[in-house]
Image (spheres, rainbow, N blue to C red):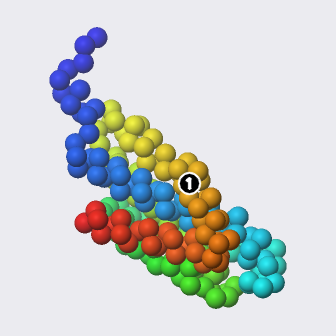
Amino acid sequence: MEQTTTEIKQRIFSPYQVFIITILAFLQFTVVLDFMVMSPLGTILMDKTVLDLSPQHFSWVVSAYAISAGISGFLSASFADKFDRKKLLLVFYGGFVLGTLFCGLAPTFGYILAARIVTGVFGGVLSSISFAIITDLFPMQVRGRVMGFVQMAFSVSQIMGLPIGLWLATKFNWHAPFLMIVGYVFPSVSLSL
């Protein structure tokens, strides 16, 4: 069965669509990296010369993101459709970056716990907003491909981001991976604007 010209054109991405896919993949990369980089930092954060966290305190810091993300996702379901998706994405991503910055500057257990909660509240909703944007902007025939590109950032963040983040943590200090994420976001966002 031959494809029509319209079907072929729908399968080719416009420059604007490529831009949207790139932004959403970048967003996914930073959110997953922020979530994943915390667990391997455990031995550093439990060191007596760093934060001297007990295993229980460290588990609270790690799980604070997931718990707050779950609560945020549940609550945002009641109001998310009432707002423009792009504005919602900007607000939640701004809060996520701010929370990540607070993680990079946190001096004590209480501060890092609060920063992880803030990061989870804002970061936990970003994937669902991204998928909503994909369904709004892309025809059904290419949505799977677009979601595949965006989700590929998950693997890339583990392959590239985690080793670099851990290298920075051992070379400098445990704040460095979080500051790297924030430092990576601002130039990239300013270039895209």
SS under mark 1: helix
x and y, in percent, of residue 13 in the image: 26, 39
Residue at image point 43% right, 60% down:
27
Residue 64 visible, this orientation = no
The image quadrant where one finds the N terminus is top left
Instruction: Give residue 139's quadrant in the image.
Output: top left
Q: How packed is label 1: few (under 14 Cα within 10 Å), some, or many (20 or more)?
A: few
Residue at image point 53% right, 82% down:
102
x and y, in percent, of residue 176 in the image: 58, 75
Q: Answer left or right for 40 relative to 47.
A: left
Is 27 or 170 nearer to us in this picture? Answer: 170
Please identify the residue farthest to the left as the structure is shown: 5
Q: Answer left or right for 154 relative to 47.
A: left
Q: Amino acid at mark 1?
A: Met
Question: Dot 1 corresponds to which residue?
Answer: 160
Residue at image point 46% right, 73% down:
182
Residue at image point 52% right, 75% down:
179
